[in-house]
C-alpha cells in the first residue's frame, strides 16, 4: 500500500519543461518575413516564419525572441505559445513540447511596433526590422524579407533584392536592418557581384553619387587587398543625428562614415572607403544591454 501511494504521489508531481538555455553554438536560423509600414498609424506590422533544427545535444523547451515592438505572438504546430517572462524587448515562450536534438521546428510570428519617422528628416532606421531568436549574443542567420510602404517612400536594407521573390536576402547575417524615408531618391551601382545602393534627398544627389563611387572603389580595394569582399550588398543611407553625414547598413548595424579624401598604399582612396574597410573586419558582438539602434523616435532596446 505504501509503494502504491508513492507511485500515485510521483505521478501527480508536475515536472517543469526544459528551462531556457543558450548553447555555445546555436542553431542556424532561417527567417522569412513580410513587413508593411502604415504611415497613418506610424506602425510597422508583419508576419514571419522562423525555422531551425536543434543541432545541439540537449532538448530545447523554451525559446527567447528579441523584438523592440509592443506586439508579438508566436505559434508552433498551430498552437499559440504562452509568453512566460523576460524583459520588455526579450520575451520567453514555452514550446508545445521539448524540441529534441536533430528535430526541426517552424514558428509562425505576428508582430507590430510603433515606428515614427523623424519629423525633420522624415525617415527612420532600425538595426532589426523583424523579431529574431535571442541567445544572449549575436549569431549568423539567413534572412528573406519583403517590405512594403505607400508610394513616395523608399527602403534600404542590409540585404540584396532578389528580383524573383521581390524579397531582400541576406545570408549569415547577425541581424536585418532597414531604413525608410519619405520623399527620398535612390541610386545603385555594381562592384563586381556586390550591389551598392544609396538613398538620398534631391539636394544630396551630388554627395550620394560620390559615395557610390567611393563604395565601389572601397570594395575593389578590399578584393585586391584580401582576395574577397564578404558581403553581397551595401546600403548607404542619410544620417539621422545632427552632424552625421551618412550611415551604412552593415549586417544590419548602421555605421557612421564620412567622405573625406585620403591616400593609402600609393592609391587614392576615400576616407569613407577606409572607414568601410576597417568597420567590416571589426566585428562587435551584440551584448546584453545593447541599445536597439533606432531613428525617428523609436524606443531603446535594452536586454
Image (tube, rainbow, N blue to C red):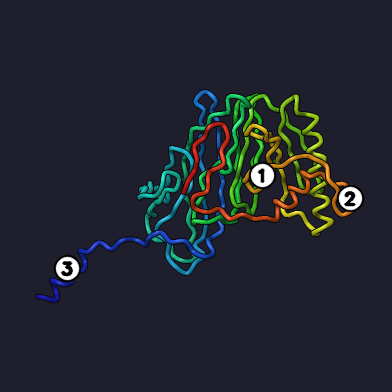
The reply to whether dot 2 and dot 3 touch (C-beta < 8 Å) is: no
Task: Please indicate whether residue 74 sits to the left or right of residue 11 in the image.
Answer: right
For disc 2, the marked residue is 267
The N terminus, quarter of image: bottom left
Instruction: Please tell me the numbered disc located at residue 255.
Output: 1
Distance from the alpha carbon under mark 2 to that under mark 3: 81 Å
Report crowding for label 1: few under 14, some 14 to 19, many 20 or more residues within 10 A (C-alpha): some
Question: Which of pointers 2 and 1 lies earlier in the amino acid sequence?
Answer: 1
Front residue of this view, candidates 65 and 97: 65
- The quadrant in which residue 272 appears is top right
Residue furthest to the right: 266
Foreground disc of the pair 2, 3: 2
Q: Residue at x 58, y 39 (%)?
A: 126
Task: Please indicate whether residue 27 sits to the left or right of residue 280 in the image.
Answer: left
Question: Where residue 252 sits: x, y (%)?
Answer: 62, 46
Question: Where residue 213 sits: x, y (%)?
Answer: 82, 40
Asked if residue 245 is positioned above or below residue 75 in the image, the reply reads above
SS at mark 3 in the image: helix
Distance from the alpha carbon under mark 1 to that under mark 3: 61 Å
- The quadrant in which residue 186 appears is top right
Question: Where residue 259 sits: x, y (%)?
Answer: 78, 39
Q: Residue at x 56, y 49 (%)?
A: 31
SS at mark 2 in the image: strand
Foreground disc of the pair 1, 3: 1
Question: Where residue 255 sits: x, y (%)?
Answer: 66, 44
Question: Which of pointers 2 and 3 lies earlier in the amino acid sequence?
Answer: 3
For disc 3, the marked residue is 8
SS at mark 1 in the image: strand
Report crowding for label 3: few under 14, some 14 to 19, many 20 or more residues within 10 A (C-alpha): few
Amino acid at each position: 500500500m505504501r509503494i502504491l501511494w508513492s507511485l500515485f504521489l510521483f505521478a501527480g508531481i508536475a515536472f517543469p519543461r526544459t528551462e531556457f538555455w543558450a548553447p555555445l553554438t546555436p542553431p542556424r536560423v532561417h527567417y522569412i518575413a513580410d513587413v508593411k509600414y502604415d504611415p497613418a498609424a506610424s506602425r510597422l506590422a508583419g508576419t514571419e516564419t522562423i525555422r531551425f533544427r536543434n543541432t545541439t545535444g540537449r532538448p530545447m523547451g523554451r525559446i527567447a525572441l528579441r523584438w523592440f515592438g509592443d506586439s508579438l505572438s508566436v505559434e508552433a504546430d498551430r498552437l499559440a505559445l504562452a509568453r512566460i517572462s523576460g524583459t520588455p524587448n526579450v520575451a520567453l515562450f514555452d514550446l508545445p513540447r521539448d524540441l529534441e536534438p536533430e528535430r526541426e521546428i517552424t514558428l509562425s510570428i505576428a508582430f507590430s511596433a510603433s515606428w515614427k519617422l523623424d519629423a525633420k528628416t522624415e525617415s527612420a532606421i532600425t538595426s532589426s526590422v523583424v523579431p529574431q531568436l535571442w541567445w544572449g549574443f549575436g549569431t549568423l542567420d539567413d534572412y528573406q524579407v519583403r517590405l512594403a510602404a505607400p508610394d513616395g517612400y523608399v527602403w534600404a536594407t542590409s540585404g540584396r533584392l532578389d528580383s524573383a521573390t521581390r524579397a531582400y536576402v541576406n545570408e549569415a547575417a547577425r541581424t536585418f536592418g532597414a531604413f525608410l524615408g519619405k520623399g527620398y531618391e535612390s541610386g545603385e551601382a555594381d562592384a563586381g557581384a556586390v550591389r551598392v545602393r544609396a538613398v538620398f534627398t534631391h539636394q544630396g544627389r551630388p554627395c550620394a553619387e560620390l559615395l557610390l563611387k567611393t563604395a565601389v572603389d572601397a570594395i575593389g580595394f578590399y578584393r585586391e587587398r584580401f582576395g574577397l569582399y564578404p558581403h553581397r550588398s551595401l546600403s548607404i543611407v542619410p544620417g539621422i543625428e545632427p552632424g552625421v553625414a551618412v550611415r551604412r547598413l552593415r549586417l544590419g548595424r548602421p555605421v557612421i562614415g564620412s567622405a573625406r579624401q585620403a591616400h593609402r598604399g600609393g592609391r587614392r582612396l576615400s576616407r569613407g572607403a577606409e572607414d568601410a574597410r576597417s568597420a567590416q573586419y571589426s566585428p562587435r558582438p551584440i551584448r546584453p544591454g545593447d541599445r536597439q539602434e533606432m531613428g525617428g523616435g523609436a524606443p531603446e532596446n535594452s536586454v
